[in-house]
Image: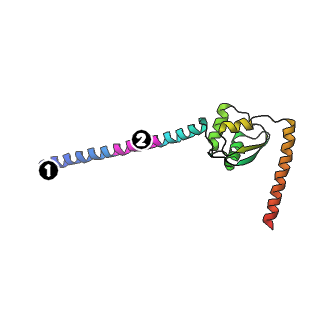
Amino acid sequence: MSSKTGINTSLRVIKLILHLLVNVALYLTIIYVAVKAGSVVYDTSYQVFGNKSTVESDGIDVYIKIGQGETTMNVASKLEQNKVIDNKLSFFLHAKLKEYPIMPGIFTLNTSMTYDEIFAVITVPKSEEELEEELELEKELELEQKDDATLDES
């Protein structure tokens, strides 16, 4: 009888240890997920509400063409592809939260610009003269692309 009681006691101890290990593993997993989620939320919030640029130094000038009626997400994708911004989702959220009206046209942006500086450029309506200059610039850019394509074929 005493051996049966000893086995029952051993089983209870093993159950208790396993129960504690499962609880510790569960709580560690919950803590890990919470820390990772907090990190993602912080990084995204910093990009949306912070004033950070892609490049800290002088940067590179980039021409971006925004068409009439183009969506904010499409503009954000173009900016991300041209390395003007790091994260198109944070740019999109920033634009929606601040309700910036993005204007059509060709804009000269720099990879060292912050979101506020970018919006200061792409939300300003263009005058007639500026629109004519943009048409000339667009034609020049198309000619350069054709020349590059011709050189690549040679």
Q: Residues within 10 Å of mark 2 (few under 14, many from 20)?
A: few
User: Residue 88 location, x and y as percent?
Assistant: 64, 43
Query: Where, by quadrant of the figure, is residue 124 drawn?
Result: top right
Q: Residue furthest bottom?
A: 154
The answer to whether the residues at label 2 and label 1 have Cβ atoms under 8 Å apart is no
Question: Does residue 28 belong to the magenta stretch?
Answer: yes
User: Residue 50 location, x and y as percent?
Assistant: 59, 36
Query: Where, by quadrant of the figure, is residue 147 drawn?
Result: bottom right
Q: In which quarter of the image is the C terminus?
A: bottom right
Question: Does residue 21 belong to the magenta stretch?
Answer: no
Whichever of callouts 2 and 1 sits on the residue coming sooner in the sequence is: 1
Which residue is disc 1 drawn over? 3
Q: Which mark is residue 31?
A: 2
User: Residue 132 location, x and y as percent?
Assistant: 87, 41
Query: Nearer the viewer's eye, disc 2 or disc 1?
Result: 2
Residue drawn 84% across and 39% down?
A: 130
Q: Is 37 in front, or is 47?
A: 47
Q: Is 5 in front, or is 118?
A: 118
Query: Where, by quadrant of the figure, is residue 24 drawn?
Result: top left
CA gap, disc 2 to disc 1?
42 Å
Amino acid residing under circle 1: Ser
Residue drawn 83% across and 58% down?
A: 146
Q: Is residue 86 above or below residue 151?
A: above
Q: What element carries label 2?
A: helix
